[in-house]
Image: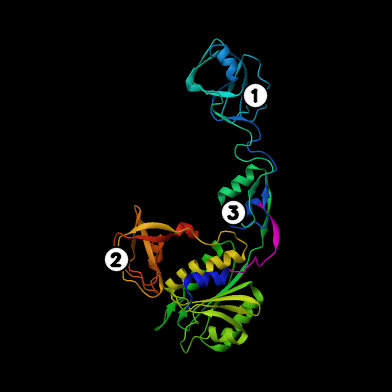
Amino acid sequence: MLSVADAIAQLTTGVSAAVGSEEVAAHQCLGRILSADIMAPLDVPPADNSAMDGYAFCYQDAVAENFTLPLSQRVAAGQAPQSLDNLTAARIFTGGEIPSGADTVAIQENCRERDGRVIIDKQIVAGANVRPKGQDIQCGAKVLSVGTLLRPQELGLLASLGIQSLPLYKQLRVAFFSTGDELVEPGNKLQPGQIYDSNRATLNALISSLGMLAVDLGRVPDNPTATLEVLQQASEQADIILSAGGVSVGEEDYVKQALETLGQIDFWKVAIKPGKPIAFGEMQGKPFIGLPGNPASVFVTFMILVRPFLLRSQGCGKITPALHKAKALFSRSGEKREVYLRGRLVEGAVEIHRNQSSGVLSSACWGDALVIQRPNISINRGDAVDIVPFSELGLV
């Protein structure tokens, strides 16, 4: 079996963006990936401006006049100021452009107006409360790099530069299906031996949350002909193919067999728990990843193995989540595989769900982090353990 690290390396090494580029209106770009660097067309802010409501003046003038200056103008935000007359001050408001000739702003709480003059607290220092031109962004600077995933803060930053449209990688089309005669669509009545298909709902949401187009090919019965047909359909409709179930060694597991017939398998089985039976290969030129069929296994293996592959294929620069440390509130014996425990953070420490079965999807709803237990390493209560908060995986 491949280690988790080796599996991720094999999945992502040499992968480049699988799709072309397109120009998209900025308000439609949330969760999408930049296909080119973005350079600043202007300074932000475009001119020196006031950080506070108060009075703008030349510090040396204030010193010369014992910090008492006549008022010569009023500057509101969005208003073009006149040059400041010598030995005067301007009433100014937050965001107002600093008049030429002024270099300092005194906040209004530290000033007094009397007979058209302002008396300034002498404790003020030169340059106070001025936001200089280009403080946030300088014209010509690289603002965002190719491969950046666009979040609300990036879109706000780009709006501050007046940018209306952006070059993005086209969205990957990711086809997925689940296998199993026992699966039933939600809304139908269960018969003996049947369960509802939760895996497609999970995969649809996870794929969509990455800004990709999820192509649901439904449930495939346990027979070789139907499996071959859905794989053929997937290769014609999508850039990447995922399946849930059918890649183990059971007599009714046909996905791996079909892939060997129509394509190739690069690896099968990864030393991960929950998981292990994971097939990675190619189906008529399209990458294929076959996941286990148990719901918690689908969730974990997608987040740890599939997510970095999809992000790299979409052109994203950052594909692996940052690891954090937390104190274990539990003890657990080591196992041969790398285990991803569904955990919950508690004031800098982490507890784990009482049932870590691969079929218990509720553990992922209960938790807010994955706790990594390295192979053959036991965890004792109080140990510092590696965790991946769900927020690092784009899950909130």
- Is 355 displayed left or right of 307 in the figure? left
C-alpha span from label 3 to label 1 = 36 Å
In terms of secondary structure, what is the magenta stretch mainly?
loop
Q: Is residue 227 visible?
A: yes
Q: Is residue 216 visible?
A: no
Q: Residue at x 34, y 64 (%)?
A: 352
20 falls in the magenta region: yes
- Name which quarter of the figure residue 350 lies in: bottom left
- Residue 58's x, y, as percent? 60, 19
334 falls in the magenta region: no
- Decide: is 176 above or below 152: below
- Is 105 displayed left or right of 272 in the figure? right
Q: Amino acid at mark 2?
A: Ser
Sequence-first tag of 3 and 1? 1
The crowding category of the residue bearing disc 2, from other C-alpha atoms within 10 Å (few below 14, some 14 to 19, many at least 20), is: some
Q: Which residue is mark 2?
A: 331
Could you tell me which secondary element the residue under label 1 belongs to?
A: loop
Sequence-first tag of 2 and 1? 1
Q: Which residue is mark 1?
A: 99
The crowding category of the residue bearing disc 3, from other C-alpha atoms within 10 Å (few below 14, some 14 to 19, many at least 20), is: many
Q: Which residue is mark 3?
A: 150
C-alpha span from label 2 to label 3 = 39 Å
Q: Amino acid at mark 1?
A: Pro
Closer to the camera in the image, 276 or 373: 373
Contact check, label 2 and label 1, Cβ < 8 Å: no
Q: Residue at x 65, y 40 (%)?
A: 138
Q: Amino acid at mark 3?
A: Leu
The region drawn magenta spans 13-25
Could you tell me which secondary element the residue under label 3 belongs to?
A: loop
- Residue 349's x, y, as percent? 34, 56
Could you tell me which secondary element the residue under label 2 belongs to?
A: loop
